[in-house]
Amino acid sequence: MILRNTLLTVFIAAAAPHAAAQSLFSGGSAVRGNANTGQATYVQSCLACHGPRLEGSPFAPALVGSSFQDHWRGKPAAELLAQMRKTMPPKGTGTVRPEAFPDLLAFLVKANEEGSGFLAKLTGPAASSATATAANTATAIVRTAPMPAAVAQRLKGLAAVTDAMLASPAEGDWLMWRRTFDSAGFSPLKQIDRRNVQRLGKAWSLVLDQSGNEITPLVHGGILFVHSGASLTAVDAASGTPLWKYEREIARASGAARQFDPSRRARVKSIAIYGHALYMPTPDGHLVALDARTGKLLWDRAINAGAAGSGLQLSSGPLAARGVVMIGVSLGLASAGGCFIVALDALTGAERWRFQTVARPGTPGGDSWNGAPIEERYGAGVWTTGSYDPTLNLAYFGVGNTYTTATLLQPRPGAGGVTSNDGLFTDATLALRPETGELVWHHQHHRRDVWDQDWAFEQTVVTLGNGPAARRAVVTGGKTAVFEAVDAATGKFLFAHDTGLSNLYASIDPATGAKINNPQLEPVPGKALLLCPSNLGARNWPATSLNPATRMLFVPLQESCTDFTWQPRGAKETASGGSDIRFTPRMRPGSDGKLGRLIALDLDSGRVAWMHRQRMPVASSLLATAGGVVFMADVDRHFGAYDQDIGALLWSTRLPAAAESSPIAFAAGNRQFIAVVSGEASHLGNYNRGLVPELGEPVTEISLQVFALPER
């Protein structure tokens, strides 16, 4: 829940309902609420963005302090209450119970009235009320639908997915987030091509449960699997006929009737299939394994994410290989020690290993955190599904930044032996052994990132060059839209390409990739600095697509800038976590208003082959196919196909909502289909819409839209 500059006049019931006390802020308006109950609601629905002590974050403003209070002092309580009910959480109105808002309001006012003494008690999950911290339990329901005998037989005989199948999937299948281990996001299907794509039309659609979108369907053996929120549905890929549906129900710890809690809104990018199992992260921080043939629950394992007040979440998808299922944990805004990658046994769900993405004191890289104890190291989230090279037997993961930047910025008296403030393993690519979690190599793309410019996105594995000079490489780009290639076996830097949308780097060493930061952007306490791009990046989680034959990388980009401000806090505040950097979005100086870009980057030459520019920011990942087209969706509900050779728009349609997701291509019944989930519910989509004020209200209904050529 993100509240934008809010506070008001209110009577508070701090300990018991209806026991009101006069608020510090007067205005003649009253709202009755229970501040303790409101605290529980805050921990569950607001903490991840606003921080454990209401201090704000890169994702949301502070809910305490002078600017918050000055904005609302003297205004009627009803005004803020109406704003909360209408707009909170963004893209998810209705997911917090209406009767909870007065309680939440009481908690916010109590925090502002009592100030530092009260806030000091809100140091993290341990400060949550019993209602918020009690463990949630869950049950599952599987619903099946009548189906043709042939379809039922196909489900029953669905082949187990092996490592070999994942390494070289059938042409018509889409078995993982970016289809193949290398995260290329490319389909070898070519029934739909440059000549006939104009004839593409709607084949079928399916309404899905509410979620944060960012969804990628999977297809195996003519069966399509799509997750949304806390459910996963199997449908006939040719017709869209539902076959079975798994629904996870979460019991409220307060003893309320067992029901799905919609406030836990997932925005997981993908699921995985391996053997006969489907692996789905759940909104309450679990990874479940389901029988792909029936939807039956095989196992359910809690991961230390999603629990009330933890500040951790599962936003990436699982990667299955070598008998394990690997997944990263993200955010870590207020979780001391930061994030991690965990591997579970694919058959049993037992934890096999855990790799901490914040280097620990006394370990390699542990001296790169400015002498800070582990309790003051935060972030290093893994936001994106990993990649894998079967030949090298290495899994690749990108890692994000820290949030409490004072840990790296401020001198620490008495921190003897400190060698750097690079902050490993933030903004790095990690190469791990799937069986053991052994770190084989790492490459830190940006040292000491205190600007929230993560390098946490897809790691595309590609062979560059030909003949004896060919070498296997990992290509990835951060929010600055600088793309780098490193050797897939060793992590050695190969080259960098700067798309020119960032002002953060003064120079990049062509031999090592080392970056010299722009000295004019060195953080100054309390001073706003113009940073391009914004904290949401010139690129973010919407993924690139690589044509392996041409080695052309298709990249979604957008212009954005922000006023960046570092707001130092006291040592005690720093130790409790939360972000100390603030962002105010701004247009890029001299912008012509065209914010969205699609470029074709030739990885062999390092040059941009062509560029398409448009007013609307990009909403989806890209999908390139062997038919010579690349598909992309924007925030104005357009879904289009572009010529891979020149970037010309060949076909476009309007979707029911913007597709903040990853489109796929698959084949069923001798037809090629293009599928994309539409629905405007992601944080990135919300930000991008804000750059284009002429857009109307967002459409949050989630649905799967499937296209094909007319049947002959």
Image: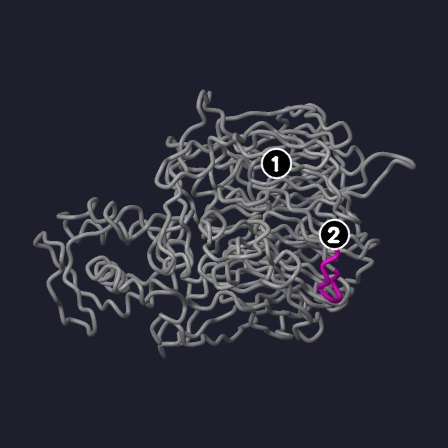
Q: Is residue 501 left or right of residue 78?
A: right
Quadrant location, the N terminus: bottom left
Q: Give the distance between the C-alpha atoms of the residues marked 2 and 1, in whole angstroms.
A: 30 Å
Above or below, 94 relative to 130: above
Q: Amino acid at mark 1?
A: Lys
**Foreground tag (2 vs 1):** 1
Report the residue at 64% width, 52% height from top. 239
Q: Amino acid at mark 2?
A: Phe
Answer with mark 2 or mark 1, whichever residue precedes in sequence.
Answer: 2
Residue 298: x percent and y percent?
Answer: 65, 75
Above or below, 415 relative to 709: below
Q: Is residue 654 left or right of residue 62?
A: right
Report the residue at 23% width, 59% height from top. 115
- Look at the image and give the residue range highlighted in magenta: 433-440
Residue 503: x percent and y percent?
Answer: 52, 30
Whether residue 146 appears in magenta in the rendering, the answer is no
Residue 581: x percent and y percent?
Answer: 41, 45
Q: In the rendered image, which residue does mark 1 sit on?
A: 515
Q: In the rendered image, which residue does mark 2 sit on?
A: 181
Residue 238: x percent and y percent?
Answer: 68, 51
Above or below, 641 relative to 141: above
Report the residue at 36% width, 36% height from top. 527
Q: Residue furthest bottom?
A: 255
